[in-house]
Image: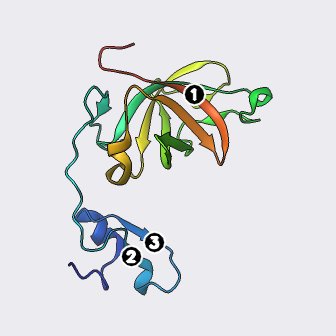
Amino acid sequence: MRDVGDARPAELAADGVRVQTGLVGVKDGVIPIRPGEEDVPYAAPQGANVTADPAMGPHAVQARVTFLPASAGGRTTPAMSGIRPILRLGEVLTSCVVRSVEGIESFQPERPYDVDIEIVFWHEYGHMFSPEAPVRLYDGSRLIATGDYLLPGED
């Protein structure tokens, strides 16, 4: 087991250990998410259109999503590219970052957009990703967008 008691977040991030900061009572505000375990090497799920763009990381998947209007329970203001909603992966809800592929700054409701979805905790929940499952994005418990993952070759 690796001792990280005196490590700083930048050092931990540089050598590939994921950290969580800001916890009360943790020495130097740092604790490894899974102490003593190494990160699992990345492997894309079969059939997924997964990008390896360094800006997005190896755990970004492409999708076409439509944000719901406020009248259907969606947001009252347009979502911005870079929004951090909750993504449903099977029975699990996890954090993600949604960015426009087309360089659009805000997502208007009821219009489809091609996006990159970065699954923040890919190493924890990536095995639950299924490219055939629908995309479901939430703001808390409220569904704000739906769509489909794009398979290689789909426009």
Residue at the spot of label 3: 21
> Residue reaching furthest right?
71
Residue 117, image x, y percentages: 44, 36
Tag 3: amino acid: Thr
Considering only vertical position in the picture, is 4 above or below 88? below
Q: Quadrant of residue 55?
A: top left
Q: Earlier in the sequence, mark 1 or mark 2?
A: 2
Considering only vertical position in the picture, is 53 above or below 9? above
The reply to whether residue 55 is visible in this rendering is no
Tag 1: amino acid: Thr
Residue at the spot of label 1: 146
Q: Quadrant of residue 3?
A: bottom left
Residue 146, image x, y percentages: 57, 28
Is the C terminus in the top left, top right, bottom left or bottom right quadrant?
Answer: top left
User: Which residue occupies the foreground of this view, 80 or 1?
Assistant: 1
Residue 31 image label? 2
Q: Earlier in the sequence, mark 1 or mark 3?
A: 3
Count of all numbered marks drawn on residues in the image: 3
Residue 90, image x, y percentages: 46, 40
Between marks 3 and 2 in the image, the one whose residue lies nearer the viewer:
2
